[in-house]
Image (cartoon, helix red, strand yellow):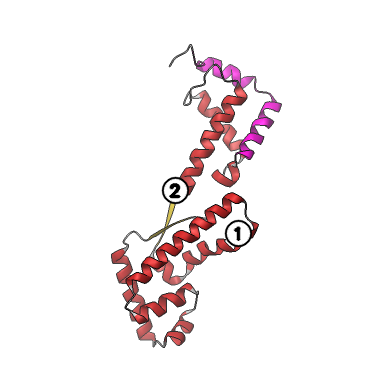
Amino acid sequence: MDLVSHYSIIEVEEQISMLEEAGVTRLLNVYRTLGCEQRARLADVDVLHHVITQALELERRWPRDLNIITYLAKSGRSFIDNESKKSASKATTASIDDFLHGESLAADTSAMAKLSHSSTQECVENHQTSSLIAEWMEKIRQLFVDDKDANCFIEQKLEEMKKSKIMTFCEFSDQIYRNVEKRIKDKVRKRFPNGFPWWSV
């Protein structure tokens, strides 16, 4: 490490030990402004703890031309950005059983009802989620484009219909219902062995 242009571990410890309460308050405000809670699901104090730990362990080099507030603010921004990207790219995997039982889909799509009460960031995330779900539902529909019974079953499942109502609407006997459900499961598992990826809301 270049000790001329960057602080040594002893100097880092000295700098942090001199951080005053006013500086801490300022940094916490910066992290909140950067969206630590909304974007990265982190409290401002958690971000501060992380960047200080990073500095003390020399995981992030501290240039001498940056004062402590600027350095910790930049470190916090980088950390929040990275955690936000991880959160956005992290996929949950719903199995065909989840879909057929209506649990995972309902949990994800229920977020759309919150759009009018959400922050800008949450609105963007919810829009992306609904688009991804719609894309995967269309892929499932395409598998059964020539299967009238399966199409009826899927469309009613998307409407969160119970088994009894699906049987009535689609004119299924109990045996036909079970056969259609099995046919859908088998075909979807074969086509999408890893399940359906869509973002957690």
Q: Residue at x 46, y 80 (%)?
A: 163
Q: Nearer the viewer, residue 196 or 13?
A: 196
154 w.r.t. 69: above or below: below
31 w.r.t. 7: above or below: below
Residue 97 highlighted magenta (yes or no): no
150 w.r.t. 57: above or below: below
Percent x, y for residue 59? Answer: 46, 26
- SS at mark 2 in the image: helix
Percent x, y for residue 168? Answer: 46, 87
Q: Residue at x 46, y 85 (%)?
A: 169
For label 2, the residue is 89
In-image side of 76 versus 94 (left or right): right
In this view, the residue farthest toward the right is: 22
Cα–Cα gap, marks 1 and 2: 21 Å
Residue type of the residue flagged with mark 1: Leu
Q: Residue at x 39, y 86 (%)?
A: 174
Label annotation for residue 115: 1
